């Protein structure tokens, strides 16, 4: 029986056992190291009559190979049926183009929740306590003139997007004594089991404006889409409470970065904790120089444990699809 071909765009960093198991069942072909070379590789595959049934899009592969977008999909030989993408967000794959091509797209929701929530809380505390400024002065032998910080206890945390990550943030923030409010398109439902008991104490607000005007800290946890691009602009930032704080560990383009810089420089927003940026990997100079901003270079899910789980789930989707036609975590619906 002929083995199906799988194209790996990007490398497997940690789930090596799962990669070896997949390689025993299918023919794995690894993409070239640059986008130009990859397109040449795909042209050669066409000439040789080779097709790929599935693509594995590796963690952070977009930095070197770009998005799996319409030009890349058009360059592929015919026969592609599945794009398995490592990551909860799937904006690095053109899901609309894939759907038009009758190609499934999968992501890795759920497995990133804990790590991203931990990173959110890390940025929250770093921002409230001016941790970066204190450490910078210590490491550079500068005089210590620490500015007094804030306690999260009794603050109101407004979560925009109460999905898996939002819920994980809410649970951790409750342990810090914070009151939790949230805004979604609709209220969440939850069960009475012990794992979700904490959700009984969160409050739904039907409008984003109501959340912004009420929160001491606003934390963004929505996927990037045409609807959420620049969801937070100057208008929304102006509605936040004077002296409030802003966190974003979702996607950079959800926020108008220039407007955020201006709100920080004016003092209307007291501080921000950011793991994502509008023009990654570039960071706005106004954020880099502002000591009221805690920064991370998109490392919310960057742990051995979480990347292993993301990679394994992506390969499970590919194996299940090629063996049975089923999927665990589809993003789109091609029917």
Image (spheres, rainbow, N blue to C red):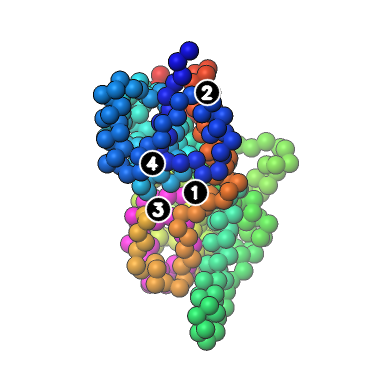
Where residue 330 appears, as percent x and y from the top left, is: 48, 29
How far apart are the two marked residues, 2 and 4, measured between alpha carbons?
A: 27 Å
| Pointer 4 residue | 92
Q: Residue at x 60, y 63 (%)?
A: 155
Residue at 53% from the left image edge and 51% from the top image edge: 302
- The disc placed on residue 252 is 3
Q: Cα distance, mark 2 to mark 1?
A: 37 Å
Mark 2 = which residue?
A: 25
Q: Residue at x 36, y 68 (%)?
A: 286
Does the image show residue 182?
A: no
Whether pointer 4 and pointer 3 mark residues with C-beta atoms closer than 8 Å, the reply is no
Distance between the alpha carbons at the discs numbered 3 and 2: 38 Å
Asked if disc 2 and disc 4 are in contact, CB closer than 8 Å, the reply is: no
3D distance between C-alphas at marks 1 and 4: 17 Å
| Residue topped by disc 1 | 221
Instruction: Give the magenta part as a residue range.
Output: 250-279
Q: Which of the marked residues, 2 or 4, is nearer the chain's N terminus?
A: 2
Above-or-below relation of 247 to 301:
below
Q: CA distance from mark 4 to mark 3?
A: 13 Å
- N-term-proximal mark, 3 vs 2: 2
Residue at (68% x, 47% y) in the render: 198
């Amino acid at each position: 029986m002929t083995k199906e071909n799988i194209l790996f765009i990007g490398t497997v960093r940690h789930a090596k056992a799962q990669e070896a198991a997949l390689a025993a069942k299918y023919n794995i072909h690894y993409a070239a190291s640059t986008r130009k070379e990859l397109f040449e590789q795909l042209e050669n595959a066409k000439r040789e009559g080779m097709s790929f049934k599935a693509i594995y899009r590796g963690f952070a592969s977009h930095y070197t190979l770009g998005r799996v977008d319409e030009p890349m999909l058009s360059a592929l030989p015919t026969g592609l049926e599945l794009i398995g993408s490592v990551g909860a967000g799937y904006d690095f794959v053109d899901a609309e183009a894939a759907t038009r091509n009758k190609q499934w797209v999968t992501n890795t929701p759920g497995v990133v929740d804990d790590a991203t929530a931990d990173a959110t809380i890390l940025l929250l505390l770093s921002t409230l306590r001016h941790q970066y400024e204190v450490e910078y002065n210590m490491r550079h032998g500068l005089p210590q003139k620490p500015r007094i910080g804030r306690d999260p206890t009794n603050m109101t945390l407004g979560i925009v997007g109460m999905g898996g990550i939002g819920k994980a943030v809410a649970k951790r923030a409750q342990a810090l004594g914070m009151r939790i409010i949230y805004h979604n398109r609709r209220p969440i439902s939850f069960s009475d089991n012990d794992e979700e008991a904490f959700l009984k104490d969160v409050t739904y607000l039907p409008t984003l404006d109501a959340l912004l005007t009420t929160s001491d800290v606003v934390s963004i946890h929505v996927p990037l889409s045409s609807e959420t691009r620049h969801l937070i602009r100057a208008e929304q930032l102006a509605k936040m409470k004077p002296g409030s704080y802003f966190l974003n560990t979702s996607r950079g383009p959800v926020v108008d970065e220039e407007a955020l810089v201006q709100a920080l420089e004016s003092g209307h927003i007291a501080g921000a904790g950011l793991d994502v940026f509008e023009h990654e990997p570039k960071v706005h100079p106004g954020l880099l120089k502002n000591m009221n901003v805690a920064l991370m270079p998109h490392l919310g899910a960057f742990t051995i444990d979480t990347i292993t789980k993301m990679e394994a789930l992506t390969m499970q989707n590919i194996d299940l699809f090629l063996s049975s036609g089923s999927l665990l975590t589809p993003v789109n619906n091609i029917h």
